[in-house]
Amino acid sequence: MKTTEHFKNTIETYLRDRAETDKLFAVSFGNPDKNINDCCTYILNWVKQSGCNGFADEEIYSLAVHYYDEKNIEIGNPINCQVVVNHTIELTAEEREQARQNAIKRVENEVYNRLTITKKRQNVQTQPYVQKSLFDL
């Protein structure tokens, strides 16, 4: 199976956290016959069969738990795909301030470039075209 590493890591992190708090699930999660790659293959095949494109996190996590809880489960064939995982990045106060300063600098540069281009256009004055008269000699 070739899926995004972030998807696998997200599922595995959830399962590890659940195994730490749920001792019954920890037994299933420790089964040497089960692995994260087959778990992801099972999830992706189930999603493909459903015909839907979006799922709540809880639905996907419950499929992962179901894979580990069932002794004999049909995982299906590996699927090569890209999976979008919703996540948010928490920035520190310093990182937010740095991002803000970078954005301000970027806007200043854009405005400066626009102004200099406008001034260059204004400075380039073309000689007005004066049509000569046939009667002026």
Image (cartoon, rainbow, N blue to C red):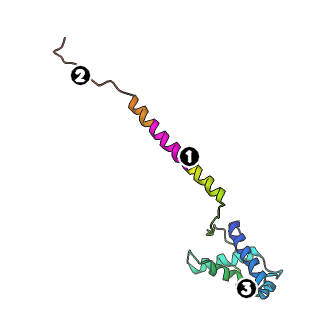
Residue 115, quarter of picture: top left
114 within the magenta span: yes
Task: State the separation of the CA atoms marked 3 and 1.
Answer: 56 Å
Task: State the separation of the CA atoms marked 2 and 1.
Answer: 48 Å
To which residue does mark 3 refer? 73
x and y, in percent, of residue 22 in the image: 76, 85
Locate the N terminus and report the quarter of the image it occupies.
Answer: bottom right
Q: Is residue 10 left or right of residue 52?
A: right
To which residue does mark 2 refer? 131
> Which numbered circle lies on residue 105?
1
Of circles 2 and 1, the one toward us is 1
For the point 65% across and 64% down, the residue is 90
Residue 23, quarter of picture: bottom right
Q: Give the amino acid type for the residue marked by disc 1 in the picture.
A: Lys
The residue range painted magenta reads 104-116
Query: Circle 1: is it few (<14), some (14-19), or many (20+) Cα within 10 Å?
Result: few
| Upstream in sequence: badge 3 or badge 2 | 3
Of circles 3 and 2, the one toward us is 2
